[in-house]
Amino acid sequence: MTRARIAIAFLLTVVLEIAGGVVAPAQAQKAGGTLTIVRPTDPVSLDPQLETTAPGAWVYFNMLEPLLTMDEKMQIRPSLAASYEVLSPTRVRFKLRPGVKFHDGTPLNAAAVKFTFDRALRGTPPARWASLAGSLSGAEVVDDLTVDVTTREPYGPILRTLAMYCTGIVSPTAVQKMGADFSRAPVGTGPFKFVEWKTNTHVILERNPDYWGDKALLDRVIFKVVPEEGARMIALQTGDADMVLLPAPAQLPALKRDSKYVVHEVVGGRVVFAGMHAALPPLDDVRVRTALLHAVDRKAILENILEGSAVPARGVLAPSVFGFKDMQLDRLYPFDRAKAKALLAQAGFTPGPDGVLQKSGQRLSLSWLAARGRYPKDGEITEAIQAMFKEVGVEAKVQFLEWAAVFTQFRAATLNQHMFTLGWVTSNADADYSLYALFHSKQVPPTGWNTSRYANPRVDTLVEQARRSLNQTEREKLYGEVQDILAREMVWIPVYNTKEIVVTRANVKGFTVHPVEYNLWLGKVWLDK
Amino acid sequence: MLTFVARRLLLAVPVLLGVVFVVMLTVELIPGDAVALMLGEHATPEAVAKLRDYLGLDKPLLVRYGAYVGRVARGDLGRSIQQNRPVVDELADAWPATLELTAAALVLAAAAGVAAGVVSAVWPNSLFDGIARVGSLFGLSMPVFWTGLVLIVIFALWLPWLPVGGSGSSGHLVLPAVTLALPSIAMVARMTRSSVLDVLHEDYVRTARAKGVAERLVVTKHALRNAAIPILTLLGLQAGQLMGGAVLTETVFAWPGLGRLMVKAIFARDYVLLQGTVLVFALAFVVINLAVDLAYGALDPRIARQG
């Protein structure tokens, strides 16, 4: 196939609905009021250039809008772009919405899009999200309201990349005028605009009366910092807060029963797993790895440790991710100690004098690196699995270190640990992001995140092919095959898939929790007083 | 007197230089890299290298130390690595809150602690003394995050008199100040009791009583003034402790102070911000110690003459 033919094959025009379906409200919406949100930490910055983590994203997502957006069903929707057209595998043309103004009154145009991408990709230093953007190379102005976004090579996930929460278009005038201060008072086009940020205390936003779409119903939003989990829950009960982010899991059952509160939850994008170093004996033997999967009672972990705040992982990806295929873990690797022992026996291990299996005098002892508190209950699940391993004669020596120290070991070129506890979120909701960085043989740290040192030439070919294709049906098939192979060769023990949970008081209406935790959309929220 | 103050302040300079060096060395030695942490799980090695270069983190430790000290001498504490914001601004946001909380707790510790201690000493083994002694044991043993939450449940949830957390009004200050002060009240009370009890057995107290001085005057003028030196020393130490120990209280009550800023800097390995906060703490310790020394002189003229 020649380049031209590929180009023709993908010369498809997709015009998106401009207005979006208007659902008849079940209850008359009321405008006005202040919504107070409590969450544990202050943002690093309110500029995606400097901040891609949740504390900042929760706030700026309501002020800075990307070209596209991802709805709660993970479908791509228009945002600042009214329509787009894939011109070639490396070029997508966007028609911007006319008449959109930034909060400072300057118009949104193609030059502003180019400015945002130039600043992010070519700034010194580049934006924190530049490394999330794959092959994105920049934007070219066609006319005032038409802009071409280009990639260095054919890049399948381009549309999902441009729908990421952190790719919001900023006002070039404001950036130039404010300099470094922009990161503390960003200017975008969103339904809310910035009012005040008092460090470690609160960030206040107010309604943008000139918003291009359905105007926000709330007058104001206050994001308060309450680091202590117990204090956050009390603030909700006293009415000091209307919405709690990262609520205490143990209190959720009681809150669900109480009609004064609503627990909003959805399966999120992060998979927490016990990773295995597939190049380090004895874990280079697939029988040993799958034996370990059979040894783990995931149901017990979910019920007793996570107490309903998560769901069992169904593979290496979360179900909300494009390209996800159920790896059928419960069918392939049910909790079965006899099976685990049989597999280990096949691999040549015999019971040793101290109850730990051994092979030619070598005890089956695995080193394990983990942090505590980086992901929900990561320390507890590590200890639980350690105990479950012991039941089948496998010793695990767990070393708990602070996250910063663990992180340094993960990023090093060599990892001298058999196992590790880690979480992974597919930031752009496209399988490429995870399957490429985690399982391509060339993506061993520090380049990528193939901490398992997994190497399979077929998987390499498939993920490369899927990355270069812009045919989404074909990509989905390729990723399906990758996950089928991974299901046979298992280099992870996928434990749980996080839930995104937000608790509100019952008078908070119009809120839907999004599978991507960063996408905390308040544009439709209202208060029923 | 003035030369004494000036000499003491001058002596603070090598202390601060040493503090900065130790902080820098510690950050260098503990595992964890500020830039890699900041860029997160998904950063490319090129991006990490570029940012390290941009922030000057690839230079040797001593070069960075020299550059830092040079900047500090000109009044520039640098920009925080994480937020790219002048550290001076970060500190200016946080230190008034910490000062407010520490001062309130210290006043509370001094007032309640001394009062309880004196009453206990004057009527030793009385009912009040018993309650005060058990109470101080409790105050010393309970961790602040526990007492803090209990106070929140009682005074914000059950009796909605005070806000759950945050800062802004004097109402916001009450619960964190009480929580922070409790262990100090206990310590000051016990110290005051024992040192007043000691003094009450001194000859000059017997003389004062013998010459017919009213008991109230004996206690306040003769006994307490002489017992004040160890109490003052303890209060000086407590002032430093309260400031540093405010971290947990600040966390429970969402109080936007220096302690939380410092913990944040440590976890992010943001050494520039960390040095700024440590400098402020170190400077505060120097000033508090100086103030305590000057107060000794005011209380006891013999010390002032030696100084």
Image (cartoon, rainbow, N blue to C red):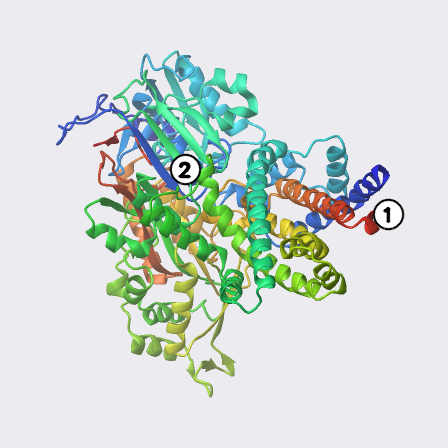
Residue B153, how many percent across, how many down?
Answer: 36, 51
Which residue lies at the image location 65% right of the left edge and 52% below the top edge? B235
Q: Chain of mark 2?
A: A
Q: Is residue B31 left or right of residue A303?
A: right
Which residue is under mark 1?
Answer: B305
User: Which three-letter amino acid code belongs to the residue tagged 2?
Assistant: Lys
Res. A224 mark = 2
Badge 1 and badge 2 both on one subunit = no
Query: A356 and A385: which one is in front?
Result: A385
Q: Nearer the viewer, mark 1 or mark 2?
A: 1
How many residues crowd mark 2 within 10 Å: few (<14), some (14–19), many (20+)? many
How many residues crowd mark 1 within 10 Å: few (<14), some (14–19), many (20+)? few
Which residue lies at the image location 46% right of the left edge and 23% below the top edge? A116
Q: Chain of mark 1?
A: B
Position of residue B109 relative to residue B84, above or below, is below
**Please, which residue is most extreme toward the bottom here?**
A353
